[in-house]
Image (cartoon, coloured by chain):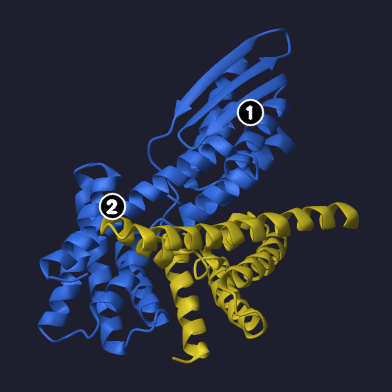
């Protein structure tokens, strides 16, 4: 049955879009268009940040339902771009299923920046925001070093597959301790400025903004879920830094 | 510290995040330039307004138009340019201080700072939604 197999592929595309950082309504829209292009007379899609449910009625009366549970996100805007182009191409040209499968595999294997470049970007972000919030050059250099270390720490902890909230707590604590230490040994000037650069790497600021955007756009449930996630993550980042400061008798 | 340095740092910060979000090729520079522009607009609006929330709204709205135009010219989703461009405006530090107050039991400060953080996020989100809706209406009229 073409409907069943096709819906699986359409959901693969939708799932990958959501994981890569697409908005909820874009995912719903893409899945609906894809199914309609392949002969669905009615498509009902319900997407929230952690799940996708689709029921499609195909010509001839067959009805197919499939669901997906999404556990992890990895923002990859290059992949999102390619998935977008693929889904547009499928709607226009209606290629056969093996072609879609092959293209999807190709997209899943497309490359990201090298580990070295990723470490450097962490350093760059930490340095940039330390200066942005008024830190001195020495603070910026210390922040950059801690930033690169932070990336290394995150990749290390993620191998153990522990809860993201705890990853944030631990990373914030370590960054806080390192920032305080650097000032104690006389390298850095202002621990708060060194921390703020690295905080921008850990705090879910974009998630907070996007959650409000979802709510305004009418995806209330997704927005509320994301808002809760952002607040929980942010409070554990604050606890991590709070503990580190408490060690040094601060705050 | 001079505004020029801050604007440069907004560019570098957005560049860093654009790399982490795997934006590639010429789009990387365009996305990072969005970060520079958004902070420049925020500071420019500050000359007349001196209100972070209204400034954020205006900067978010204008940068959304920038992202929509870039998306159409470069044939990529708007998110690609928008996500990187709003980074300097995102209330990351405000959110952090809010939760720090909560963790340290400073509830009066927590409420004040929390309301401020939410207002900033709301202003950004509203700016984005308003501008992208206007862009959509604009494209319909032009066609």
Q: Nearer the viewer, residue A209 or B103?
A: B103
- The location of residue A191, given as percent across then percent down, is 23, 77
The residue at the point 67 percent across, 54 percent down is: B129
User: Hey, which quadrant is residue B9 in on the image?
Assistant: bottom left
Query: Which image quadrant is residue A122 in?
Result: bottom left
In front here: A187 or A93?
A: A187
Q: Is residue A122 above or below residue A31?
A: below
List x then y, in percent, for residue B64: 66, 63
Indicate the position of residue A29 as horizontal and vertical percent values: 66, 36
Quadrant for the C terminus of chain A, please. bottom left
- Residue A96 image label: 1
Q: CA distance from mark 1 to mark 2?
A: 48 Å
In the image: residue A2, left or right of residue B11 = right
Image vertical order of residue A70 relative to residue B14, above or below:
above
The subunit carrying tag 1 is A
User: What is the quadrant of the N terminus of chain A in the image?
Assistant: top right
Camera-side residue of B110 and B138: B110
Q: Is residue B76 visible?
A: no
Which sits in the foreground, A110 or A44? A44
Q: Secondary structure at mark 1?
A: loop
Q: State which chain is coloured blue.
A: A
Q: Please identify which colour was used for chain B in the image.
A: yellow
- Chain under disc 2: A
Residue with the mark numbered 2: A236
For mark 2, give the secondary structure: helix
């Amino acid at each position: 049955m073409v409907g069943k197999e096709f819906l699986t592929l359409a959901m693969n595309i939708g799932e990958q879009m959501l994981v890569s950082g697409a908005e909820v309504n874009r995912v719903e829209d893409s899945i609906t268009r894809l199914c309609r292009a392949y002969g669905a007379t009615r498509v009902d899609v319900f997407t929230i940040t952690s799940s996708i449910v689709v029921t499609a009625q195909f010509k001839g009366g067959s009805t197919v339902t499939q669901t997906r549970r999404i556990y992890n996100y990895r923002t990859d805007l290059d992949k999102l771009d390619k998935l977008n182009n693929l889904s547009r191409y499928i709607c226009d040209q209606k290629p056969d299923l093996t072609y879609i499968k092959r293209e999807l595999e190709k997209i899943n294997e497309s490359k990201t920046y090298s580990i070295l470049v990723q470490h450097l970007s962490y350093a760059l972000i930490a340095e940039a925001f330390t200066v942005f919030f008024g830190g001195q050059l020495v603070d910026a250099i210390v922040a950059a070093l801690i930033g690169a270390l932070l990336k290394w720490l995150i990749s290390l902890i993620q191998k153990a597959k522990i809860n993201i909230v705890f990853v944030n707590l631990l990373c914030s604590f370590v960054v806080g301790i390192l920032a305080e230490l650097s000032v104690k040994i006389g390298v850095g000037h202002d621990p708060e400025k060194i921390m703020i650069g690295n905080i921008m790497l850990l705090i879910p600021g974009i998630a907070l903004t996007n959650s409000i955007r979802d709510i305004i756009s009418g995806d209330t449930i997704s927005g509320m879920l994301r808002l809760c996630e952002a607040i929980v993550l942010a409070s554990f980042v604050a606890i991590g830094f709070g503990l580190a400061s408490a060690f040094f008798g601060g705050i | 510290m001079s505004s020029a340095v801050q604007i440069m740092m907004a560019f570098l910060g957005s560049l860093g995040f654009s790399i982490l979000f795997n934006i590639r090729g010429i789009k990387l520079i365009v996305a990072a330039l969005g970060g520079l522009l958004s902070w420049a607009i925020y500071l420019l609006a500050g000359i007349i307004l001196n209100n972070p929330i209204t400034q954020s709204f205006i900067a978010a709205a204008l940068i959304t138009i920038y992202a929509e135009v870039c998306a159409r010219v470069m044939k990529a989703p708007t998110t690609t340019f928008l996500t990187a461009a709003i980074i300097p405006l995102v209330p990351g530090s405000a959110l952090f201080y809010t939760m720090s107050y909560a963790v340290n039991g400073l509830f009066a400060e927590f409420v004040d700072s929390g309301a401020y953080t939410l207002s900033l996020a709301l202003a950004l989100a509203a700016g984005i939604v308003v501008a992208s809706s206007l862009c959509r209406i604009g494209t319909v009229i032009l066609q």
